[in-house]
Structure formats: structure tokens, C-alpha cells
Amino acid sequence: MTGTLYGVGLGPGDPDLMTLKAHRLIAGADVIAYPAPAGGDSFARSIAAGAIREDATEIIIPIPMAIERFPAQDIYDKAVADIRPHLDAGRNVVTLCEGDPFFYGSFMYLFARLADDYPTEIVPGVASMTACAAVAATPLCARNEVLTVIPGPLEEDELKARLSASGAAAIMKVGRYLPKLRTVIDDLGLTSRATYIERATLPNEKRMMLADAPEKAPYFSMILIAGSDPYASH
Amino acid sequence: MTGTLYGVGLGPGDPDLMTLKAHRLIAGADVIAYPAPAGGDSFARSIAAGAIREDATEIIIPIPMAIERFPAQDIYDKAVADIRPHLDAGRNVVTLCEGDPFFYGSFMYLFARLADDYPTEIVPGVASMTACAAVAATPLCARNEVLTVIPGPLEEDELKARLSASGAAAIMKVGRYLPKLRTVIDDLGLTSRATYIERATLPNEKRMMLADAPEKAPYFSMILIAGSDPYASH
């Protein structure tokens, strides 16, 4: 009898936006696993902290700062080596995932290595994207609008092509790409439709029109571009 | 002192995927509002049923079947007339929304009519899209992939243009458009990357490759097209 590997979405940051299922699984977990920047605090763990048992075994997946976006695959080989003995011994392992596990999440690297050998279950969570729309008080997409979800690190030409073809758009992972994104959005005449949001649903969240955004953006920031559907805004 | 209008995302269908916040707001609500097909049961209410107080006042927003996708705006004028007296009397009104309120949701029509006059709060929920990825056990998008979210009712030419330009894609509102979507996806050579999911997270959910999908799809069905990132699948 092997244990089950769970990938549990925690939502965007406010612990109150965890699902009932996520909360219950975490509160019952003997073993939890989560990413943390080398030498820093884990954002995922901080969301779930109130539900974690004091006697839970914690497996930390250390993410070196320099490669935070595309971690070297050997980090996950190491994490898998830490996780396998628990699953083999019949203990469930609950992996804490910011947002939703399968929406630009790193859980897929564990999943790819373990899903053939153990029962796995993905528990979806509130994605940062819809949380940002809630904070911005602006519908993300309406009726038959196409929504394009665009990672900020893309090259300028591709960003332009994607944004000019799209109605509504959400630009993820803004962070240090903010100056480039501002230029592209401005060149396309979309600045008046663009909202900037950082740390959505956390106590220090900010939302403003992109034109009023600060010069530096944290990693957890996003730009939403409203579609042209008149029913989508008030 | 007026009441607050809440738009509360309920997630994709499994009541266990409601957020802690949604559950608490519903359990405390004197007045709830929700859409229901004329003469039928409300899907939104069914998700929240276990949390609704017996003495809660329930405002039903009747959606005629024939125009379920784009309800006539007078339906919302009528709903607003039912809701205003409660807000004016200082009672909060909790509006139940399938999935996420601002991700192709109809709550925006109430929001557009009431947000200037009353305090409003949007509580994001788990979107059907990420729930489908969880059920399909396939990451929706990875690393720097673009994800295009496409409503199934679009014209064939636009569907083709959108799908051929995109990496990963999620096609919403499949329902009666399934035959057209199959043709387009097949013409583009994408069938082997396409997964069909219906009623995700409900007891009668189904997931299969699109090639094996039934001839008729219910309204709550979706097609996910995996991107080409090798790390996104196992």
C-alpha cells in the first residue's frame, strides 16, 4: 500500500482563499513538501501555515534565487528522492502549491517524475489571475471574448504580436520585465485599458492603472488588459 | 448604512472546492441570490446548498433556456430591483457564482448596475479551466508558454486562426459546438494533443482524449489542448 502524492493549490495568498479540500488535506497531512527560495521563507508554506500540524514532517524543495523561474531539473530529482520513501511507506505527501498546481506551477516537475509510480491527485486552487481581476474590480473576460495569458519574459516582438491579436489579456510574471512591458503596451495604445496589480489578496496588495504603477515590480505582480466588450466593465 | 454586494465564486462543482471565505460568507448570509434556468434547478445553488441557512432569503435570477449564454439585459434589471431593497436596508447580499465571478461569469451584469451605489466585493473561485486540467491530469501551461482561452461559439475561421497561433489552449462552452470544434482541431492536426472533459469534479465527470469523446457534449464541457513544452507532460 503506497501513499498518495497530492498537489494542492493554495490560492493567491490570502489563507481564506484556500479551498475546503486543501485545508482538510493539509490539516491531516503527516508529510508536506513545498518550495522555498534558498535561505528565505516559503510563500506556499506561509499561506498554509495555520493548517499545518506541529508534528508534520516537512520536505523543503530549495529553489536557488538565480534560477527561480526555470529551476534546474536536478532540484526535482533531489526532492523526489526525499519524497519516495514516504510514499513507499504508505504515507501520503501533500505538496503545497501557490495558486493552482497546473497553471504555470512547478508541481508538474514532481508529477512528471512520480505519477507513473504512485497514485496522484491534483487539487485545483484559485489562480492568481482571477484573484487579480477580483482585486482590480474588473471582469477578466466576458461572453465570447478570447483571453490570452502571456508570460512577461517573452521577447518584445512576440509580446507585441500576442497583445495586438488579443481582446482581453493577462500578463503573468511581470516582475523585472515591467519596463519592457510598459513600452510594448504603450506602443500598442493599450495603456488606458491596462491595470497593474501586485501581491493580490495579501495585506500589502496594490492595484492601480498601469500608467500609475511604480518603477519596480515584485515577482508577484500582473498586468490585466481589459477586453472591448462593453458588458465587461461598468 | 447600506449592505455589501458579494460576488462569490463557488468553484467548478465539487462543494469541497469552495474556498473557506466563500463557505463562511454563504453560511452567514441573510440574503443570497443566484441564477437558475427557468423551471430548472440552479447549479450554483446546488454547489452551495450545504452551507445555506434555512432562514435565508433567496433571490432567484431566472435565465430563460433559449438565451442562456447571453441573457437579455432586462433579466438583470429585474434582479437588481429585487436586490436593492436589501442593500438599502443594510443587509448584505451574497450572489452565488459558478466557477469564478469574473471569468466568463454573469455576475458582471449585476456588478455593472450596482457597484457605483453600494460597497461590493468579489471573492475569486476555482475556475472550471484549472479544475479540468486537474481532472485531466495534464498541466494547462508551463514555463513561458502562452495560453489562449477560446469560447467554443466563435466562428470557424476565428477558431482556426486562434488555435493555430497558440501553444496551449482551453476551449470553453463546448456544448453543442463539439462537432464544429472537432473538425477545426482535426484540420489543424491537433487532435492527438486534445483532451475532452465534462462536468469536472462532479460525481459524473468524464475525461478522455477528444478522439474518444461522445457525439453530444453537455453545456459544462471543455477541450484542453496541451502545449508543446516537454516539461508540461510526463
Image (cartoon, coloured by chain):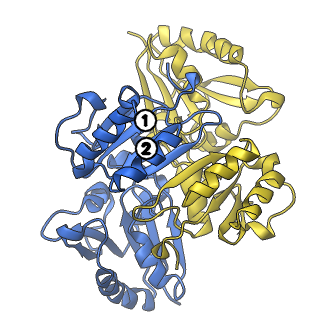
Chain colours: A yellow, B blue
Left or right placement of residue B118 versus residue B68 in this view: right
Local secondary structure at mark 2: strand
Disc 1: which residue: B225
Kind of residue at badge 1: Ile
Query: Which label belongs to residue B41?
Result: none
Q: Are marks 1 and 2 in contact (CB under 8 Å)?
A: yes
Left or right placement of residue B183 versus residue B167 in this view: left
Left or right placement of residue A82 versus residue A155 in this view: left
Disc 2: which residue: B170
Residue at 69% x, 52% y is A160
Residue at 46% x, 72% y is B6
Q: How many badges with numbers are in the image?
A: 2
Q: What percent of the width, then of the height, locates residue B114?
A: 47, 84
Local secondary structure at mark 1: strand
Q: What percent of the width, then of the height, locates residue A156?
A: 75, 46
In this rendered view, identify the residue nearer to me: B233 or A185: A185
The image shows residue A145, relative to residue A35, as above or below, that is below
The image shows residue A33, relative to residue A42, as above or below, that is above
